[in-house]
Amino acid sequence: MIFQYGRLWPDHPFCFRIPYQKLPGKNTADREYKQCPPAIKSTVLNLLEDLEDEEWIYWCIDDKYPIALNLRRLRALVKLIPDKLPPHISGILFCRCRRMLEKEYLTGRKFYDNRRHCYLERKDYNQIWIHQFVKVKVIRHLFMQFPDNIPYAKAMDTLIEKLQPPKSHSLYVTAKNLATFGESTISGQLTLNCHQSLIHHGLPLPESLPLIHIQVTMGKNMSVWSHGILKKKPVLWLRKAIYRSILRLKKRAIKA
């Protein structure tokens, strides 16, 4: 995931905050290692503990990785955060896919930025696991609602279906899709698209993960690219051991 951001967005504004238990990596300009307890909820809350509720972060979990990014639009979006957005907005998802394409998961409210780009308000936490800009309070509040003992990652998919964001945590999605993401794993198995990407870029394959011949991507395929110099902003990252989204698949490939 981190490799792909460096490849697709060389001047990205992120410093990835990476949790560990016993074996830290070396801190660099774009990587910060933070010791955390192994439990899912405790790890996330520890990653957030020194951040203010109203601070914007980039929430990105490594079971998804970018395949294509509309950097021209993303660069403009970064410039809006945090001072040029209406104060009630607490999250912006820019990969419009899956349920975000269905009206029943949107409130019908919208706003336009200073370039007349449209954003649609989301009803709930659906697609909260896709990479997005969000205020700390959104993730903190969400995980505070979870039980201390989360037996396995998929349980969180069920938990969020029963929860609603507070009115002060308004979440939005861009009306137009700006990114394509790939799913890395399914039920502890490496997806075909991730396997092919690792080989293509000369990265080592994880020995502990068997291959499943299924491709999973989110967001329509894109070919829009641009680059810009951006200031560093905080990012949160969770390893596969912390969270892995498991999909019920009926087809060999799923694309939104």
Image (cartoon, rainbow, N blue to C red):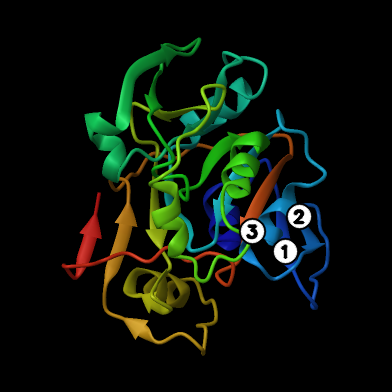
User: Could you say whether the residue bearing mark 3 is in a helix, strand or loop?
Assistant: helix
Q: Earlier in the sequence, mark 1 or mark 3?
A: 1
* Amino acid type, label 3: Lys
Instruction: Specify few, some or many for label 1: CA neighbours under 10 Å numbering under 14, 14-19, or 20 or more.
Output: many
Q: Earlier in the sequence, mark 1 or mark 2?
A: 1
Above/below status of 255 relative to 39:
above
Checking the image for residue 19, the label placed there is 1
* Amino acid type, label 1: Pro
On screen, residue 136 versus residue 85, left or right, reads right
Q: Position of residue 112 (x, y in %)?
A: 43, 12
On screen, residue 250 versus residue 98, left or right, reads left
Residue appearing at x 39%, y 36% in the figure: 178
* Amino acid type, label 2: Asn
Residue position for label 3: 41
On screen, residue 80 versus residue 70, left or right, reads right
Mark pair 1, 2: CA separation: 9 Å
Checking the image for residue 46, the label placed there is 2
Instruction: State the residue lying farthest toward the left.
Output: 251
Residue appearing at x 63%, y 60% in the figure: 148
Residue 203: tell me if it is visible. Answer: yes
